[in-house]
Image (cartoon, helix red, strand yellow):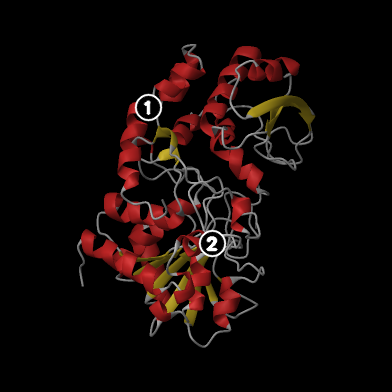
């Protein structure tokens, strides 16, 4: 059956309503979960006895973040519940159980805990991924992974690829929502240009999208998928757009090895840009993306960064020795970010300010030879403006028109207001 896009969104709303238990259905206190934090999409689905999955053979796309608030994995919970017919698991980058580092996955294996077949989705897309879904025998693909709110975090493109593949394979697709840990107040930063599309950015969204995974799924289906999938979302209750992760009351599980805390996620949308330079972005330390540096940098960079007057953040002269990645085993100098007002803090503007001040205060500054910075920022704009001597305000001004267009598009797909 082929559904119109309007019908698909109606289906999404209907399933979300059906998955909500009666006690959470009405009233502002129920909607905002006063004193109780957020209830995830999985919690609401389970509370309804998995009714939207009745009669379906189910496969779950997930990783270690797919947990309940008592830190049981949803695959283990569903596998032990006769009300749902779970027959397969699909693992993204880093794997289902999380044993692989950046740029790796776990491959095809049978999960020792449940005996379920685990299929590898990493770097698969289109018909190749559709064939995986077909071979698994599932009727419905369920997605439940914690995102961190940045365009170049690959799980949202696993979501996109899986939606596209499910449409090709004729499968239903369900997204169980989780909080955006850095809030959903605003979209920030440059918008990707399609000629720079990679696995760190498939489609033209902003660098910090300010959306949940269910909202992104709605946007992908409505704007970017050539053939929309039969999409259903189970929204959260008790989450507001202004909420940071600690308001959710949910335990934090690192979504990837270099995302150890919600504080890492808070800065990541800006400081991940240093992956596109010859400076360390802090991988191999206990504070990835909060520590930045290179051999030969001294206190002048911290002084220059503080001189920018960036809102909500201060910079400390710091020295560290990464245990892996750039400058492994060498002591380097740089800065540590200290966010003191997260509501005022703009991670993308901060990332640009740090790039500008690093280039001006350290003569050794260089972009990665492959211009990876263009893939991260989504165009040549940031690199060429900084190379031309532009300051932070001038670089940020360069993407405002495109960002305004994305914000208008985004508004239609938001579930929480």
Q: Position of residue 228 (x, y in %)?
A: 27, 60
Would you say 147 lies left or right of 281 here?
A: left
What residue is rendered at 66% in x and 34% in y? Answer: 339
Residue position for label 1: 400
Q: How far apart are the two marked residues, 1 and 2, measured between alpha carbons?
A: 35 Å
Mark 1, secondary structure of its residue = helix
Q: Are marks 1 and 2 in contact (CB under 8 Å)?
A: no
Mark 2, secondary structure of its residue = loop
Q: 287 and 19: which one is in front? A: 19
Q: Residues within 10 Å of mark 2 (few under 14, many from 20)?
A: some
Which of the two labelled residues, at mark 1 and mark 2, occupies the earlier sequence position? 2
Task: Give the label, 1 or 2, closer to the camera.
Answer: 2
Disc number placed over residue 251 in the picture, else none: none
Q: Is residue 346 above or below residue 261?
A: above
Q: Quadrant of the N terminus?
A: bottom left
Residue position for label 2: 33
> Does residue 160 appear in this view?
no
Q: 149 and 319: which one is in front? A: 149
Would you say 222 lies left or right of 307 here?
A: left
Residue 66: name its quadrant: bottom right
Q: Position of residue 168 (x, y in %)?
A: 29, 65
């Amino acid at each position: 059956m082929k559904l119109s896009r309007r019908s698909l969104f109606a289906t999404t709303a209907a399933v979300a309503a059906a998955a909500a238990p009666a006690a959470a259905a009405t009233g502002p206190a129920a909607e905002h979960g006063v004193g109780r934090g957020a209830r995830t999409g999985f919690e609401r689905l389970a509370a309804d006895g998995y009714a939207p999955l009745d009669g379906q053979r189910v496969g779950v796309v997930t990783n270690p973040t797919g947990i309940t608030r008592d830190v049981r994995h949803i695959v283990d919970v569903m596998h032990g519940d006769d009300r749902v017919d779970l027959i397969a698991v699909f693992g993204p980058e880093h794997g289902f159980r999380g044993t692989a580092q950046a740029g790796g996955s776990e491959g095809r294996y049978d999960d020792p805990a449940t005996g379920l077949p685990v299929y590898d989705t990493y770097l698969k897309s289109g018909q190749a991924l559709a064939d995986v879904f077909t071979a698994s025998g599932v009727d419905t693909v369920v997605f439940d992974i914690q995102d961190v709110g940045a365009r170049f975090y690959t799980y949202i493109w696993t979501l996109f690829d899986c939606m596209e593949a499910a449409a090709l394979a004729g499968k239903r697709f369900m997204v169980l929502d989780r909080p955006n840990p850095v809030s959903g107040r605003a979209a920030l930063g440059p918008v990707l240009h399609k000629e720079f599309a990679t696995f760190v950015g498939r489609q033209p969204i902003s660098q910090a999208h300010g959306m949940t995974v269910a909202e992104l799924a709605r946007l992908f289906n409505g704007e970017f998928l050539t053939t929309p999938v039969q999409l259903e979302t189970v929204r959260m209750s008790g989450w507001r757009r202004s909420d940071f992760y600690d308001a959710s009351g949910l335990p934090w599980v690192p979504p990837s090895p270099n995302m150890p805390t919600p504080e890492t996620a808070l800065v990541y949308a800006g400081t991940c840009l240093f992956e596109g330079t010859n400076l360390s972005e802090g991988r191999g330390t206990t504070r990835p993306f909060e520590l930045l540096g290179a051999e030969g940098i001294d206190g002048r960079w911290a002084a220059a960064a503080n001189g920018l007057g960036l809102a909500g953040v201060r910079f400390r002269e710091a020295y560290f020795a990464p245990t892996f990645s750039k400058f492994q085993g060498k002591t380097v100098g740089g800065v540590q970010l200290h966010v003191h007002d997260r509501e005022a803090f703009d991670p993308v503007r901060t990332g640009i300010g740090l790039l500008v001040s690093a280039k001006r205060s350290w003569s050794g500054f260089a972009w990665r030879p492959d211009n990876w910075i263009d893939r991260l920022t989504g165009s040549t704009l940031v690199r060429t403006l900084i190379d031309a001597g532009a300051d932070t305000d001038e670089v940020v001004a360069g993407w405002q028109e495109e960002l305004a267009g994305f914000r208008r598009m985004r508004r239609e797909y938001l579930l929480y207001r």
